Amino acid sequence: MSSSRNLAEKPPVLVNAAVTYSKPRLATFWHYARVELVPPTPAEIPTAIQSLKKIVKSAQTGSFKQLTVKEALLNGLVATEVWMWFYVSEIIGRCGIIGYNV
């Protein structure tokens, strides 16, 4: 009988601990989500176009070979993030992960 009482008393304690643990982390997540996950404003679109033109020009001229390791790593991480967002949106659109070699 004592063990069943113990079992009944633990869930509220665990839920409270989970809420206490999660609140600051969720606040941080929502802070960055509001800043980073918004679509570009019309004022930012010309800057994005210029950036894209610069990337294409560097690919054509080979100047991307002059990047530092840190810059190349950051560019690779950004490309990977875009690639993963594409796959996530495809999986959501297909309503399943079937058909992908994961």
Image (cartoon, grey):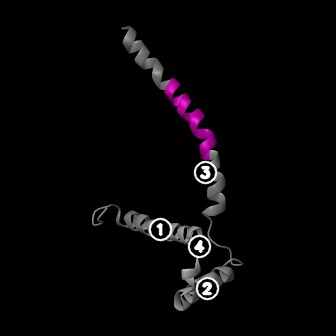
Question: How packed is label 2: few (under 14 Cα within 10 Å), some, or many (20 or more)?
Answer: few
Q: Which residue is mark 1?
A: 80
Dot placed on the residue nearer the N-terminal end, 2 or 1: 2
| Inter-mark Cα distance, 4 to 1 | 18 Å
Classify residue 7 as left or right of residue 67. Answer: left
Q: Is residue 60 magenta?
A: no
Q: Are marks 4 and 2 in contact (CB under 8 Å)?
A: no
Label 4 to label 3: alpha-carbon separation: 30 Å
Helix, strand or loop at label 3? It is helix
> Disc 4 vs disc 3: Cβ atoms closer than 8 Å?
no
Amino acid type, residue under disc 4 in the picture: Thr
**Sequence-wise, which precedes: disc 3 or disc 1?**
3
**Residue 14 on the magenta segment:** yes
Q: Which mark is residue 54?
A: 2
Label 1 secondary element: helix
Q: What residue would you read off at disc 3?
A: 29
Query: Crowdedness of circle 4 by 10 Å Cα count: few (<14), some, many (20+)?
Result: few
The x and y percentages for residue 78 are: 53, 68
Disc 2 or 3, which lies upstream in sequence?
A: 3
Residue mark closest to the camera, 4 vs 3: 4
Which one is closest to the eye, mark 4 or mark 2?
A: 4
Helix, strand, or loop for circle 4?
Answer: loop
- Residue 89 in percent (x, y) is at 43, 66
Measuring from the top left, give residue 43's x and y in whole percent: 72, 78
Q: Residue at x 66, y 53 (%)?
A: 31
In the rendered structure, which amino acid carries the disc numbered 2?
A: Lys
Give the magenta part as a residue range: 13-26
The vertical placement of 15 against 61, above or below, is above
Question: Circle 4 is placed at which residue position?
Answer: 68
